[in-house]
Amino acid sequence: MTGRGDAAGSVTAFTVLLMAALMSVLGLVAEGGQVIAARERAMADAEQAARAGAAVLSPGEAHLGGILDPGSAPALAAERALNADGHRGTATVSGRVVTVRLSPFRVRTPLLALVGIPSVSVGASASAEAIDG
């Protein structure tokens, strides 16, 4: 009977370690999904902002009464689109290409904070080229 008490203690230690491993995997799955979704949203918002800036450079915009301005107007249009989506970032124009860099932001990870990862930085960059027509 004395052997049974020793085995019960080892089962408890094994259970604690198994639960810690399962919680870590749960944190990776649940919060990893949140981080991936945030990256996809950030990329989509950066792409949309770049397209908004490139639209200002498009000759079709000039025909609709817009201004064809290779200066600051495309960058301002892209940055306004970023701000409308709740992001901060910068836009640059090089020829007919508008490039948007979304400033990194933090995604909170409460479960992963238990293993020392309280948040993950997410950012994005996208370019769009103005097309004719």
Image (tube, rainbow, N blue to C red):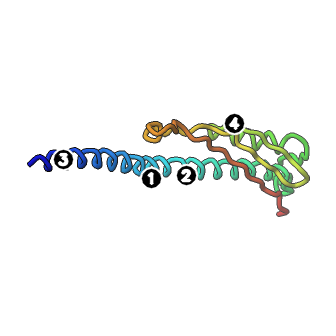
Residue type, numbered disc 4: Arg
Q: Which residue is outermost to the bottom?
A: 133
Image coords of residue 129 (percent x, y): 82, 57
Q: Which mark is residue 29?
A: 1
* Sooner in the amino-acid sequence: mark 4 or mark 3: 3
Kindly report the distance in space between the C-alpha atoms of the residues bearing marks 2 and 3.
Answer: 41 Å
Kindly report the distance in space between the C-alpha atoms of the residues bearing marks 4 and 3.
Answer: 56 Å
Q: In what element is the residue under mark 2?
A: helix
* Sooner in the amino-acid sequence: mark 1 or mark 3: 3
Who's the residue at 13% across and 49% down the image? 4
Kindly report the distance in space between the C-alpha atoms of the residues bearing marks 2 and 4.
Answer: 19 Å
Residue type, numbered disc 3: Ala
Kindly check if marks 1 and 3 are in contact, taking CB atoms under 8 A apart as contact: no
Image coords of residue 113 (percent x, y): 47, 37
* Sooner in the amino-acid sequence: mark 2 or mark 4: 2
**Residue beneath disc 2:** 36
Who's the residue at 32% across and 47% down the image? 19
Image coords of residue 75 (percent x, y): 81, 42
Q: Which of 108 and 69 is in front in this view?
A: 108
Q: Which mark is residue 88?
A: 4
Q: Is residue 42 left or right of residue 109?
A: right
Mark 2 nearby-residue class (10 Å; few <14, some 14–19, many ≥20)? few
Who's the residue at 76% across and 46% down the image? 100
Image coords of residue 76 (percent x, y): 80, 39
Mark 4 against mark 3, which lies toward the viewer? 3
* Sooner in the amino-acid sequence: mark 2 or mark 3: 3
Kindly report the distance in space between the C-alpha atoms of the residues bearing marks 1 and 3.
Answer: 31 Å
Quarter the C terminus occupies: bottom right
**Residue beneath disc 3:** 8
